[in-house]
Image (cartoon, grey):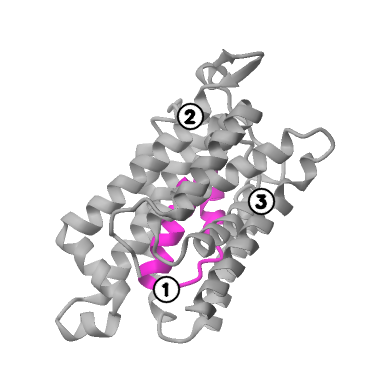
């Protein structure tokens, strides 16, 4: 179920604001790096949240579609000279079309066949993409260079990259676009209804298959946008996107199913937590542990509150 309601100030948000103020005083640069990294996490997790909230399918190939999009973006740059930021536009439409094809050929046939079959299918898609990438591009990391991606500004005694601010900016843009789609368009309103009650939506005449087709295609297309903005600062190899699959699932679990606003807030919060840990000498390798530790704490707290209510 996708929650299209506006986000209200509550106790959790107040605690987050207080923590941000403390971190800003204690480690201001970690706050900036965390904001940038968290924006990227949110940008990648938003399409997964849309798929889970409306279609309800566990797409284990989520990060691998991102990898494939990055390879295509790399080819557009190397062979056609298309700037990676400009490539976000063709990548969106290429992967929108790919999402359409994947849905029609595979996804639609397992929607009612149980979660195990869905997991097996999407795991198979993931393996196909990884093996295809290894055969075509080998495991050698690919990098591209654009001068503007190396720009920076001085902050206190530190230098902070400016390019990475595109990550949270794009995440906010995608979030706003998705909310407008869900609230202002007939198809988006139908998608919200399907996410809340698919059987009831079918009874009142909503074509659920059309909704699933559209939502899945748009979600895969958004990964093309994420790939374009990542290319100047991220090496591409067959497993580039795999860690983002797990972190995207973690963000969805933390925010709650269908809570798109929570994806953005949770992504930034976890990005800041990672950045703070990495800024402490000798503890940089603990960042992933902190990421999932915070996730576990949130889930346990939520479960405790439900048991008390």
Element under disc 2:
helix
Rendered image: mark on residue 56: 1
Residue 236 in the figure: left or right of residue 13: right
Answer with the quarter of the image where residue 107 lies: bottom left
Q: Which residues are magenta?
A: 42-71
Q: What residue did someone put label 3 on?
A: 239
Residue 47: % across, % down: 42, 56
Q: Position of residue 214 (x, y in %)?
A: 29, 63
Instruction: Give above or below for 36 relative to 213.
Output: above
Q: Evaluate if marks 2 and 3 touch, with contact meaning CB atoms under 8 Å apart.
A: no
Q: Residues within 10 Å of mark 2 (few under 14, many from 20)?
A: some
Foreground: disc 1 or disc 2: 2
In the image, residue 13 lies in the stretch drawn in magenta: no
Question: Does residue 272 lie above or below 188 as drawn?
Answer: above
- Report how far apart the C-alphas of labels 1 and 2 lie in the structure: 31 Å
**How far apart are the alpha carbons under marks 1 and 3?**
25 Å
Quadrant the N terminus occupies: bottom left
Question: Which quadrant of the view contains residue 124?
Answer: bottom right
63 versus 300 height, above or below: above
Residue closer to the observer: 233 or 23: 23
Residue 227, percent across and down? 49, 42
Residue for point 24% across, 72% down: 193
CA neighbours of label 1 inside 10 A, class few (<14), some (14 to 19), many (20+): some
Q: CA distance from mark 2 to mark 3?
A: 24 Å
Q: Residue at x 46, y 65 (%)?
A: 256
Q: Residue at label 2?
A: 165
Secondary structure beneath disc 3?
A: loop
For marks 2 and 3 on the same chain, the one whose residue lies earlier in the sequence: 2
Residue 224 located left or right of residue 208: right
Q: Is residue 72 visible?
A: no
Coordinates of residue 257 in the picture (x, y in percent): 44, 67
């Amino acid at each position: 179920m996708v929650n299209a309601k506006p986000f209200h100030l509550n106790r959790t948000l107040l605690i987050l604001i207080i923590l941000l103020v403390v971190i800003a005083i204690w480690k201001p640069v970690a706050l900036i790096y965390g904001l940038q990294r968290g924006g990227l996490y949110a940008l990648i997790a938003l399409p997964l949240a849309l798929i889970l909230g409306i279609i309800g399918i566990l797409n284990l190939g989520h990060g691998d579609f991102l990898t494939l999009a990055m390879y295509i973006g790399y080819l557009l740059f190397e062979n056609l000279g298309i700037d990676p930021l400009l490539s976000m536009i063709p990548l969106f439409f290429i992967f929108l079309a790919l999402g359409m094809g994947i849905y029609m050929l595979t996804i639609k046939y397992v929607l009612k066949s149980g979660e195990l079959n869905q997991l097996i299918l999407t795991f198979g898609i993931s393996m196909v993409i990884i093996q295809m990438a290894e055969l075509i591009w080998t495991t050698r990391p690919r990098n591209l260079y654009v001068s503007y991606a190396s720009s920076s500004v001085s902050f206190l005694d530190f230098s902070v990259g400016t390019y990475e601010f595109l990550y949270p900016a794009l995440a906010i843009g995608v979030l706003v676009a998705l909310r407008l789609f869900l609230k202002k368009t007939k198809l988006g309103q139908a998608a919200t209804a399907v996410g809340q009650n698919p059987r009831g939506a079918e009874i009142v005449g909503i074509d659920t298959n059309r909704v699933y087709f559209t939502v899945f295609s748009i979600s895969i297309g958004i990964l093309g946008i994420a790939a374009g903005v990542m290319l100047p600062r991220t090496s591409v190899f067959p497993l580039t996107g795999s860690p983002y699959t797990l972190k995207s699932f973690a963000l969805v679990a933390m925010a709650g199913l269908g809570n798109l606003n929570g994806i953005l807030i949770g992504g930034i919060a976890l990005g800041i937590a990672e950045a703070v840990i990495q800024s402490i000498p000798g503890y940089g390798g603990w960042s992933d542990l902190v990421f999932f530790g915070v996730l576990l704490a949130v889930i346990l707290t939520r479960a405790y509150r439900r048991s008390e209510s």
